[in-house]
Image (spheres, rainbow, N blue to C red):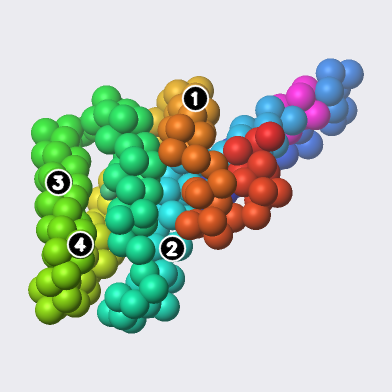
Amino acid sequence: MNLSDYHSVSKNLHSGQHHENSIIGPYLYQFRYKINIVHLVNKMADLAEILMVDHLAIRNLSRDLNGRTDNFELAGFHEYVMSCHVEIEEKIVFPMLKGGMWEDSRNFNSAVDRIKADHKLIDALAKNLIKWHYDGNAEMYSLRFPLYFKLLLEHNGNEESDLFQRWDRLDATEVRGAKKDAESIIDSFGRKRYLEIVGYTDAAFAYIFGR
Ligand SMILES: [Fe+2]
Ligand SMILES: [Fe+2]
């Protein structure tokens, strides 16, 4: 719940009390209150929050690895990054954010493009790392491996501070639809693999996606 939602509920609670002596007052109050509760429930885990949980999982993985490359399968993990997480950002989230009615649209859209360009850089580095690994160039692989997570974590942080903060200012119906579209991308990538990487249980995933 953000501050404006809180104010909205408080205002309607107050207006319900205001009408309590009239015949329709209590019903009007209940109706308004229900509308607000439905609104809040639908906002419990929006797509920006889901992507930030992905970021948290990536941050924890990076911390656990602590630069060690043994037993870490970069190709599979990077496939998740590009085919699932980045796919959701580039196909759904970034275009919707750019379509928002912002007072600083020009600057904001440039920020979206700049952050989107990081994806190509991270992908190019990962492809080099995977090639060095398969070629047996262990020295280059272990030397550059920490840079992959460094760039990815910096990039994720910029998304959180500069882009995702505006997500809940977009149209609520479109935001709800976006979550369904994201679920399709997760299913195309493989729901089971997604759950393993991010660390959701089936029940948590069902709750978050309203199943
Ligand atoms: Fe990204
Ligand atoms: Fe991201």
Question: What element does badge 4 sit on?
Answer: helix
- Mark in front: 2 vs 3: 3
The reply to whether callout 1 and callout 2 are in contact (CB within 8 Å) is no
- Mark in front: 3 vs 1: 3
Q: Nearer the viewer, residue 150 or 39?
A: 150
Upstream in sequence: badge 3 or badge 1:
3
Q: CA distance from mark 1 to mark 2?
A: 24 Å
Upstream in sequence: badge 2 or badge 3:
2
Residue 168 is inside the magenta segment? no
Question: Which image quarter: residue 38?
Answer: top right
- Mark in front: 2 vs 4: 4
Residue 31 is inside the magenta segment? yes
Upstream in sequence: badge 4 or badge 1:
4
Numbered label attached to residue 120: 3
Q: Amino acid at mark 1?
A: Gly
Q: CA distance from mark 4 to mark 3?
A: 21 Å
Query: What x and y, as percent, mark residue 132?
Result: 14, 65
Mark 1 crowd level (few <14, some 14–19, many ≥20, 10 Å Cα): few
- Mark in front: 4 vs 3: 4
- Which residue lies under the disc numbered 4? 134
Q: Is mark 3 within 8 Å of ligand 1?
A: no
Q: Is residue 211 visible?
A: yes
Q: Nearer the viewer, residue 30 or 110?
A: 110
- Which residue lies under the disc numbered 1? 177
Q: Is residue 101 visible?
A: no
Q: Is mark 2 within 8 Å of ligand 2?
A: no
Q: Amino acid at mark 4?
A: Tyr
Residue 191 sits above or below residue 153 on the image: above
Mark 4 crowd level (few <14, some 14–19, many ≥20, 10 Å Cα): few
